[in-house]
Amino acid sequence: MLRPPNGSHGNQPIRLKTKELMESLRYDPSAARVLIDDADWDTLAEPLQTARQQTLDDVCLMQSGDIPDEKQPLDAGFIEYPRTLLESGQLAALAGSAERLRSQVDRLLVLGIGGSYMGLRALFEGLCDPFHNELSRDERRGVPRLYFEGNNLDNDTVSALLQLLQRHCSDPEDLLQRWGIVVISKSGGTLETAAAFRLFRQALETYYGADSPRSTQLVVPITGEEGKLRSFSNERGYPDVFPVPDGIGGRFSVLTPVGLYPAAALGIDVRELLRGAVDMTDQFRSQPRGKNPVLDYVATCHLLERERGMNIRVLSTWGNRLEAVGLWYDQLLSESLGKQEQGATPITGVNTRDLHSRGQQHQQGARDKLITNVIIDKPATDSVTLPQVPESLDQDGLNQLAGRGMPDLLRAAFEGTNKAYADDRRPTADIRLPELNAYCLGQLLQMLMLATVVEGRLIGINPYGQPGVEDYKRNMSEILFQS
Ligand code: PA5
């Protein structure tokens, strides 16, 4: 596992050795490069370098506190936050509180929407057991089950969760019947989350007693320094409240308490997540094109869009566990760059599943797509192999493959699919993770966040803020509060 060498923090870039690079996330655009003119690739070097510099300079600009109007909003804090957190005492406080909560509840509700929800979902689905909630507490190694709410206004799912809690939790003295809430909202005013918080808070206070210590100890708000949720939390006296740091926007906040606190409560190795992110930032800062996943990814995506009109980006994950990373990235890219009538459209694919739904269109539909595969080299579990059956039962003909593992079959599907795309001159690029672990996931998330900002700077779009989302919020408020 790649770790920063001692004393390599601060402004000193970490120099990655060849072996370490092999163990890290890799980006390989070679199959897409055949559709990119060498001259275009070369000419982009300078603007890309400028965009990288601007992205990094923005961190200093924020620290100076002197942000010019044309740069507003500027939320570049996510770039150095993982390093700051690793070096400061704040992580210990967060981990300590998460451990306390974990030891006191068997069910954890996480309330939040958009950037206050999707990052954790990506971490949970990527790093926890796919059947987490169905395991016993021992099998879960003492961490709670997880439920998401506050990310919609769906009567049936809210009602089902309230009923589930009522059915399974009747004795608050029994750990297996205790539940708690982590409520996440940077602004503190998002209606979906606020409504869910009010509903589940009422259920929680009814269960434990409104004046009982548990009714405050088992609720952990994560919110900005100001806003309605912050004021309410102060008023209610919740002992543990964590900040969404200033200068980090929702969809860039997965590696702040927003994603890290509940991740730590689930037993995810948050230090490794942060180390992965720090290493990716250092690689971004110090490495030339060809060894720099962020710059190479941006160059490939940008040139295929600019020169060939490929403005649909399919993040094609091989295996099930990265689907939520894809959904998180859908939000990151579309909310960040979908402005001023620009911005590519992201789509998440999960293969081989989606070869049977989207595959036809990707192979023969409009030539408007760049497919970026995300491949995990080594599964987390031992290979599951196809058994041999008696010949009389071999109607499916699979005895020929007996002894071959699922990874083998997946590899054949991957190679076959990408060969078919290449044969038809449809571009693909690969992001390869040696394993699906916290370190590599930290690298991947940071890579995609940095790439989004660099591309924004390259095309003259401010990647931060989401002015368009305010329109629906304003209309909804008018309908609800003024009618
Ligand atoms: O990226 C963003 O900023 C948004 O997606 C927000 O995360 C989302 O709207 C939720 O906002 P809040 O955390 O303020 O409730």
Image (tube, rainbow, N blue to C red):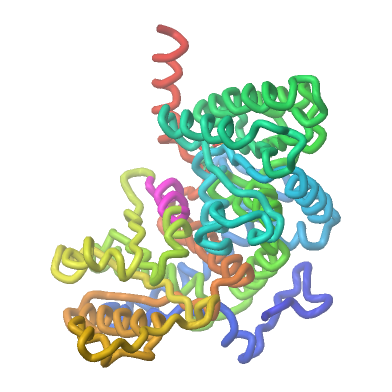
Q: Quadrant of residue 287?
A: bottom right
Q: Residue furthest top?
A: 483
Residue at 39 percent of width and 76 percent of height: 43
Q: Position of residue 84 (x, y in %)?
A: 76, 58
Magenta residues (range): 328-338
Q: Position of residue 13 (x, y in %)?
A: 71, 75
Query: Does 272 sit above or below residue 101?
Result: below
Q: Position of residue 74 (x, y in %)?
A: 59, 46
Q: Nearer the viewer, residue 457 or 327?
A: 327
Residue at 22 percent of width and 75 percent of height: 426
Q: Quadrant of residue 88?
A: bottom right
Q: Position of residue 346 (x, y in %)?
A: 35, 56
Q: Residue furthest right?
A: 89
Q: Quadrant of residue 132?
A: bottom right
Query: Does 377 sit above or below residue 152?
Result: below
Q: Horizontally, is 60 left or right of 372 in the view?
A: right
Q: Horizontally, is 120 left or right of 460 in the view?
A: right
- Classify the position of the N terminus by image quarter: bottom right
Residue 15 falls inside the magenta stretch? no
Q: Horizontally, is 233 left or right of 431 in the view?
A: right
- Classify the position of the C terminus by image quarter: top left
Query: Does 168 sit above or below residue 433?
Result: above
Residue at 20 percent of width and 88 percent of height: 392
Residue 326 seen anywhere in this rendered image of the structure: yes
Residue 37 seen anywhere in this rendered image of the structure: no
The secondary structure that dominates the magenta segment is helix
Q: Nearer the viewer, residue 251 or 160?
A: 160
